[in-house]
Image (cartoon, grey):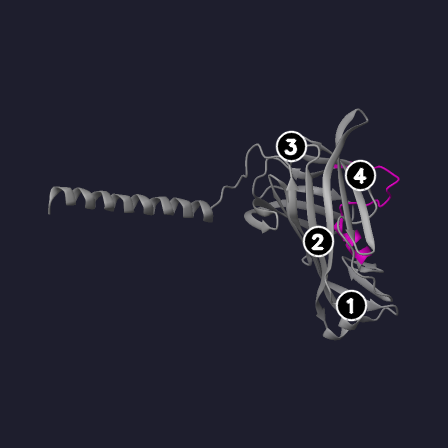
């Protein structure tokens, strides 16, 4: 073999080895993502930052099928926008006001939350709220819904009380969180867990569980998945409560909230079946 040909083959063989090694490194990065988004990661805190969401609410897994006559089969779709509107001083503390307005056909509401950004987390200090973070289910007359040891007169009441973000629904009164609520804990690291809200008989925790690429209409974002657990006078979380938020460096990207095995009874207290309810939210537009 001529010397020039030998050199060419050697270079080609070396390139193949290097290419394979690089592909292996890329594959390893994809399958084993870092356990920290960024040591300096913090939730966006710039005035006039704007998030526009779509939400969907629906009922699923009806048992028996015959109780479907009581429920509308369609999915309720709503739209909401969140943005930081201004800074304000309360008790000599400078806080930033986040406005969350949401609407569906025949229903709308607004929530105002006051936050402080610290090195240890995004902390909610106080809020006004006239309802849920996101929209309602259609009202069904003469049915009762039981979950977590309590019975509710409507699915809207059920969702409002099991969201657990707000215990006051009065927009005329500024309600102070006592103690302040840690929405996100810094640094963002997998398996970090913290107490979110404690109402005595009901305790809620949050935990960073995994890093995932999440695709929504606004694009694809590298997110931390946050699991919310609820404890009802128990040392173990409720197995029928599923609440996941997906946050990236650009804010909340997606939310999945499901309540399973909700007991449905009529106005005479007779059990007629079980249902699951689900709420989804996903980001359409983000303006930093």
Q: Secondary structure at mark 3?
A: loop
Asked if residue 177 lies in the magenta stretch, the reply is: yes
Mark 1 → mark 2, Cα distance in angstroms: 19 Å
**Dot 4 surroundings within 10 Å: few (below 14), some, or many (20 or more)?**
many
- The boundaries of the magenta stretch are 156-180
Q: Nearer the viewer, mark 1 or mark 2?
A: 2
Judged by depth in the image, the label closer to the viewer, 2 or 3, is: 2
Mark 1 vs 3: CB contact within 8 A: no
Q: What's the residue at 69%, 40% (across, down)?
A: 50
Q: Which mark is residue 71?
A: 1
Q: Is residue 66 left or right of residue 287?
A: right
Of circles 1 and 4, the one toward us is 1
Mark 2 to mark 3 CA distance (whole Å): 30 Å
**Image spot of residue 53 (x, y percent):** 69, 48
Which dot marks residue 120?
3
| Residue 214 screen position, x and y as percent | 57, 49
| Residue, disc 2 | 55
Q: Residue 44 sits in which quadrant? A: top right
């Amino acid at each position: 073999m001529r010397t020039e040909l030998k050199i060419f083959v050697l270079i080609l063989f070396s390139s193949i080895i290097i290419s394979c090694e690089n592909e292996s490194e890329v594959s390893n990065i994809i399958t084993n993502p870092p356990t920290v988004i960024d040591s300096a990661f913090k939730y966006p805190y710039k005035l006039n930052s704007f998030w526009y969401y779509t939400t969907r609410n629906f009922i699923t897994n009806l048992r028996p099928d015959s109780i479907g006559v009581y429920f509308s089969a369609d999915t309720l779709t709503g739209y909401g926008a969140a943005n930081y509107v201004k800074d304000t001083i309360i008790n000599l503390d400078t806080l930033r006001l986040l406005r969350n307005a949401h609407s569906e056909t025949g229903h709308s509401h607004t929530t105002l939350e006051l936050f402080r950004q610290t090195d240890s987390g995004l902390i909610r200090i106080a809020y006004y709220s006239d309802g849920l973070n996101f929209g309602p289910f259609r009202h069904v007359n003469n049915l009762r819904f039981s979950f977590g040891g309590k019975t509710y007169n409507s699915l809207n009441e059920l969702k409002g009380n099991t969201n657990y973000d707000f215990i006051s629904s009065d927009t005329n009164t500024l309600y102070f969180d006592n103690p302040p609520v840690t929405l996100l804990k810094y640094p963002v690291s997998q398996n970090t867990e913290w107490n979110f809200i404690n109402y005595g008989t009901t305790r809620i925790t949050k935990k960073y569980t995994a890093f995932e690429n999440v695709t929504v209409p606004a694009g694809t974002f590298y997110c931390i998945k946050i699991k919310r657990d609820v404890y009802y006078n128990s040392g173990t979380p409720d197995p029928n409560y599923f609440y996941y938020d997906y946050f990236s460096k650009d804010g909340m990207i997606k939310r999945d909230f499901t309540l399973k095995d909700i007991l449905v009874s009529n106005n005479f207290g007779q059990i007629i079946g079980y249902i699951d309810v689900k709420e989804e939210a996903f980001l359409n537009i983000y303006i930093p």
